[in-house]
Amino acid sequence: MSTKVEEKQYRLDPLKWLVAVALVIGGAVAFSYFEEQYALLIRVVAVSAVIVFAAFVAANTAKGAAFWSLLKAAQVEVRKVVWPSRQEVTQTTLIVLVVVLIAALILWGLDTIIGWLASLVIA
């Protein structure tokens, strides 16, 4: 019994990329060309459909498939993240605000003292 895994063949990748780019450029040109004939909503929906189709064409290339698998892996990793609770976020935010306030007061004090000393030297 053979357990050979067949890899997907990506043929004509340069042509697919050319088609995807041409679709996006054509959609942008058509969007501005039909500015007076059609309402904004119709043009936005049409361009969105063209961009989705161009993304589909690009996803069927080797780099597109690799990018798609990267997005899936990133989604899996995001699910693994333990997000902080509301209380933890509030406490951390307050700590940061207090530290920034203390640092600002220290710098204001130093600036005032150095300015006072400089005025004594200059005057």
Image (cartoon, rainbow, N blue to C red):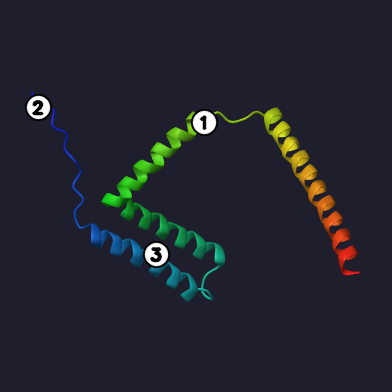
Q: Amino acid at mark 3?
A: Val
Q: Amino acid at mark 1?
A: Val
- Label count reads 3
Q: Please identify the quadrant where the C terminus is shown.
A: bottom right
User: Callout 2: few (<14), some (14-19), or many (20+) C-alpha neighbours within 10 Å?
Assistant: few
At x 46% / y 58%, what residue is drawn?
48
Instruction: Name the N-terminal-most of marks 3 and 1.
Output: 3
At x 30% / y 63%, what residue is drawn?
19
Res 2 label: 2
Disc 2 from disc 3: Cα separation: 44 Å
Disc 2 from disc 1: Cα separation: 39 Å
Marks 2 and 3: CB-CB under 8 Å?
A: no
Relative height, residue 35 to residue 55 (above, below): below
Q: Amino acid at mark 2?
A: Ser
Front-lying residue, 1 or 30: 1
- Nearer the observer, disc 3 or disc 1? 1
Quarter holding residue 76: top left
Quarter holding residue 85: top right
Instruction: Name the N-terminal-most of marks 2 and 3.
Output: 2
Res 81 label: 1
Horizontal side, residue 114 vs residue 16: left or right: right
Marks 3 and 1: CB-CB under 8 Å?
A: no
At x 72% / y 39%, what residue is drawn?
96
Q: Secondary structure at mark 1?
A: loop
Q: Please identify the quadrant where the N terminus is shown.
A: top left
Relative height, residue 102 to residue 81 (above, below): below
